Amino acid sequence: MPKIRGFKADLWTDEDFVELSPFARLLWMGMWNYACDNGHLADKSKQIKMRVLPTDDVNCAELLRELEQNRRIVRRDGVITIPNFTRHQKPDKRYFVTCDLPDCTKPDGDSQRETRGGHTEPRSGPAVGSQGPHDEVNRGEVNRGDGEGAAADKPRSTRAHQLPADWAPSEAHASLAAERGVHLNEETVKFRDWTVSMAVAKKDWDATFRNWLRNARPTNVRHLPPQTDGQGRVILPPLPPRSPWEGS
C-alpha cells in the first residue's frame, strides 16, 4: 500500500539530484511512495514502472541503473534500498510499515508522532467542536501579544476542554463589551448556550469569549431599569385591549 511522503525544498537544487535525467528524478521520487518505512522495496523494474511511470515510453531498468550509479539507491539480493530514507521520513510509529527483510524492524519508542525536525509532537486532546458564527479561527489563542496585560500571562491549558461550570466573564470582558457596545449579560447567555449545543472544546475560554465579543453585533437598544411602586414592586405594562373577535 503506497504512503504519503515528504521532500525538503532544497532537494530541487541539490547538486547530485540535478545531475539526474528528468525521468530518473521522477522515478526516484515515486519510489518513495512504494517503499516501506525503512526505505526498502522489491527490485522489480516492470512493477516499479507500472506503479510510477505507467504510460511513459521509458526504460525503467536503465533509469534504475542511473539511480544506482548516482548513489540514489542501493541494489542487493533483489531489494532496492533508498539511503538515508529514515532521516527524512518520520512516520507515526503506530502505523509503521515494514517489509519481509529480516533486518527490517520497527524502531523502538512510544507511539507519539515525530515531526520532520525530529521533535516529538504531544498527543492530541479532545476533538475541537465546530466553529460558531461568532468564533474566529482560534489558532491565535496561544498568542500572548494581545495586549490583555495580566490576562496574557495567565497559564494556558495544554489540552482543549469544555467550558467550566464556574466560568464567568472577567473585568476585561466587561470593558471590551462596553467598548464594542454589546450587552455583556446577553452575550454571556448566548455564549454558554452555544458551547453546550455545539459541544465545543477550547484551550483558552477567556480568549474565545473575547473573540465572541469582538464579533458580536452592537445593539442600539437601551436597557432601562424596571419601574417600581412605593413598595418596591415592579409595575407591569397594561395588557393590550381584547380583540372583538375573541370570545368573552
Image (spheres, rainbow, N blue to C red):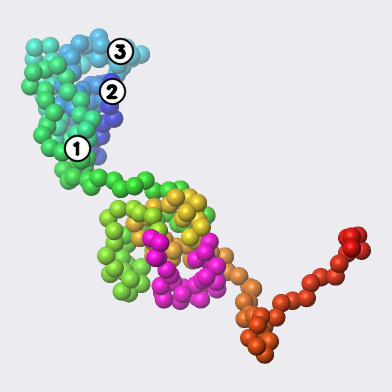
Instruction: Answer with left or right where residue 109 lies relative to residue 28.
Output: left
- Give neighbour class at mark 2: few <14, some 14-19, many 20+ (Cα, 10 Å): few
User: Residue 165's image quarter?
Assistant: bottom left
Residue at image position (57%, 65%) is 217
Between the residue at mark 2 and the residue at mark 3, the CA separation in whole angstroms equals 13 Å
**Can residue 70 be seen?**
no
| Highlighted range, magenta | 164-190
Q: Where is residue 243 in the image (x, y as percent from the top left)?
A: 88, 64
- Mark 1 lies on residue: 111
225 within the magenta span? no
Give, as a three-letter code, the residue at label 2.
Answer: Pro
Residue at image position (31%, 65%) is 144
Extreme-front residue of the structure: 248
Residue at image position (51%, 71%) is 184
- Mark 3 lies on residue: 50
> For the residue labelled by badge 3, is the local secondary structure a helix, a strand or a loop?
helix
Extreme-right residue of the structure: 244
Give, as a three-letter code, the residue at label 3.
Answer: Met
> For the residue labelled by badge 2, is the local secondary structure a helix, a strand or a loop?
loop
Pair 3/1: label in front: 1
Pair 2/3: label in front: 2
Q: Residue 37, relative to residue 160: is it above or below?
A: above
Between residues 229 and 66, which one lies in front from this camera angle? 229
Q: Residue 43, relative to residue 212: is it above or below?
A: above
